[in-house]
Image (cartoon, rainbow, N blue to C red):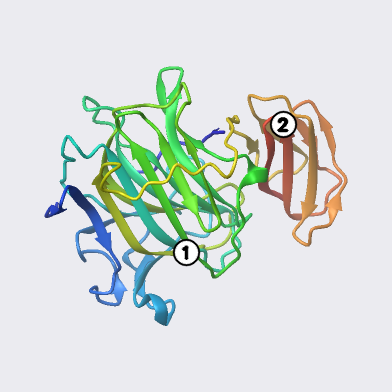
Amino acid sequence: MKKILSSLLLVSATMTVFGQVQVLVNENFNTLITGNLAGQNSWVTGGGTATDYQIVSIDAAHGLSLTTTSGNGYAATSNPNNRTAARQPAITANASNNIIQANAEIYTGSSNGSGEYRFSVVGNSSSSSTTAIALGGFTYNVTTKKLNGLGTFNNAGSPTLYLILADANAPVFPVNTWVSVSFTYNKTTGAMTWSWPGGGTSISTDPDQIAGMIAKDIYVQNITTTGNTNSNTVGVDNILAQFGSSSTLSVSDVNTVQTNKRSAISIYPNPTTDVLNIKTDSKINAVSVVDLTGRKVNVKLEGDKVDVRGLSAGTYLINVETKDGISTEKFIKK
């Protein structure tokens, strides 16, 4: 299942070959200098200031790692609170290396604002395209603490980034936790796999999968969403992205969690004073609202509008149920 996401927020090197494997990025940050990331080991940054991208020691086991800190707000367009760090090596995969595999450890941090942290492979939808898109990867929601896969699929002729798992199936990882993730994309078939501690999933027969996408770069992004008032700090370490084939890479066709397509859900205005509008392509079956203590509060649903006039001012979570599952969004009542 895939859920449409917003477009990728966008802001050279020596090729290493081991046998037939080509290393795109191999970064554990331990050779870098503590402090600002900018200018070190070909990393480029976009958004915020240099101090928002830090090489630090999160724990002894990982040595040095990269943390990014978002702004403490949100804007619907040209959001100045977003942060992007990228490695953009000029490496082209050999003809026999039709698989890109990207591994990393994501550090969830202790933030509780509204936003997500993305680790993704970025490139083009075809050899003739010059538009940068995320082929796939992972996103960690700092509000719900849920990890989900990312993948680009055809949407009425347009390459579109989706969430892979229904919200109910997305695994939860608590604060201040290291999460090992692995994403693969097969350029020949368009098949993708995602794996995480204790599980994983794959898509190999979806009619909307896209063959021939070109992997080029590795991006880590700290993105704020509607209602955010916190500076969210998250981390990453042990990035290894490489081109190979089924015979040179350890690629398992995992399918322990069901995937399913689901339409995008968004809410507006946020903050709101009286009515919260829900935008979705699917029929809304039910909604429920809880405060940050988990206490359920009463609201009235009329079509795609939720009457929140009876709520006290504060921050709430709204659960929107459609045929595709339940999605959770954060909103502020003024």
Spot occupied by residue 184 in the image (x, y as percentages of width and height):
37, 43
Q: Earlier in the sequence, mark 2 or mark 1?
A: 1
Q: Which of marks 2 and 1 is in front?
A: 2
Q: What residue type is labelled 2?
A: Thr
Task: Residue at 37% x, 55% y: name it.
Answer: 103
Bin the neighbour count of mark 2 within 10 Å (Cα to Cα): few under 14, some 14-19, many 20 and up.
some
Rendered image quadrant of residue 173: bottom right
Direction from residue 79 to residue 292 in the image, left or right:
right
Query: Can residue 47 be seen here?
Result: no
Where is the N terminus found, in terms of image quarters?
A: top right
Bin the neighbour count of mark 1 within 10 Å (Cα to Cα): few under 14, some 14-19, many 20 and up.
many
Q: Mark 1 points at which residue?
A: 234
**Could you give the CA–CA distance between mark 2 and mark 1, rounded to whole angstroms?**
31 Å
Q: Mark 2 points at which residue?
A: 322
Q: Nearer the viewer, residue 168 or 200?
A: 200
Spot occupied by residue 220 in the image (x, y as percentages of width and height):
38, 54
Pointer 2 with pointer 1, Cβ within 8 A = no
Please, is residue 26 above or below residue 327 in the view? Answer: below
Direction from residue 188 to residue 109 in the image, left or right:
right
Q: Which amino acid does label 1 sit on?
A: Val
Spot occupied by residue 314 in the image (x, y as percentages of width and height):
74, 56
Q: Which of 201 and 210 is in front in this view?
A: 201
Give the secondary structure at mark 2.
strand
Spot occupied by residue 76 in the image (x, y as percentages of width and height):
51, 41
Please give the label number shown on residue 194.
none
Residue furthest toward the top?
A: 156
Task: Residue at 38% x, 75% y: name it.
Answer: 62
Give the secondary structure at mark 1.
strand
Query: Can residue 257 be seen here?
Result: yes
Rendered image quadrant of residue 154: top left
Q: Which of 329 and 210 is in front in this view?
A: 210
